[in-house]
Image (cartoon, helix red, strand yellow):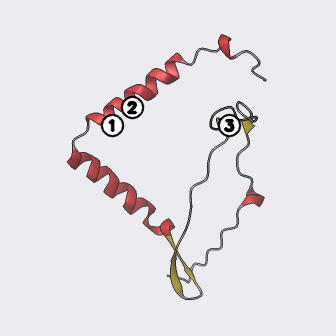
Amino acid sequence: MIIKEFERCDFRPMFEYFEEEKAKKKALSSAEKKELKKQKDEMEAKYVTCTLDGRKEKVGNFRVEPPGLFRGRGEHPKKGALKVGPLFAHSLLTCFADLP
């Protein structure tokens, strides 16, 4: 399905949902925010560093963007184009069970 007229799309429910989520996050106390950040950091800790030639190195970026509409900044020529998701061939992950 190709969307040709965005005026006919109703994004209000999505907008309202994200505004509610933003308000909930903003209403949290600083202690709750710190606890959420601590949990997130603990969950991501094993992905932040790698062992390279026996040395511990920080990984630059371990997140992958999901597919969706390309937004760009300003008047970008690809604005509104479909951004495809990562394919298996786009990444290489080497894991060994016997390594720490």
| Residue 93, picture quadrant | bottom right
Say what amino acid the circle numbered 1 marks: Lys
Mark 3 to mark 1 CA distance (whole Å): 26 Å
Q: Which mark is residue 25?
A: 1
Write the residue at 34% across / 53% down: 37
Say what amino acid the circle numbered 3 marks: Phe
Q: Which residue is mark 3?
A: 70
Q: Earlier in the sequence, mark 3 or mark 2?
A: 2
Q: Which residue is mark 2?
A: 21
Mark 1 to mark 2 CA distance (whole Å): 6 Å
Per the image, label 3 sits on a secondary structure element best described as: loop
Mark 3 to mark 2 CA distance (whole Å): 22 Å
Image-based side of 8 in relation to 97, left or right: right
| Residue 24, picture quadrant | top left
Q: Indicate the position of residue 91 as horizontal and vertical percent values.
A: 70, 62
Note whether 73 is above or below 4 in the view shown.
below
Q: Are marks 1 and 2 in contact (CB under 8 Å)?
A: yes
Write the residue at 62% across / 37% down: 73
Say what amino acid the circle numbered 2 marks: Glu
Q: Earlier in the sequence, mark 3 or mark 1?
A: 1
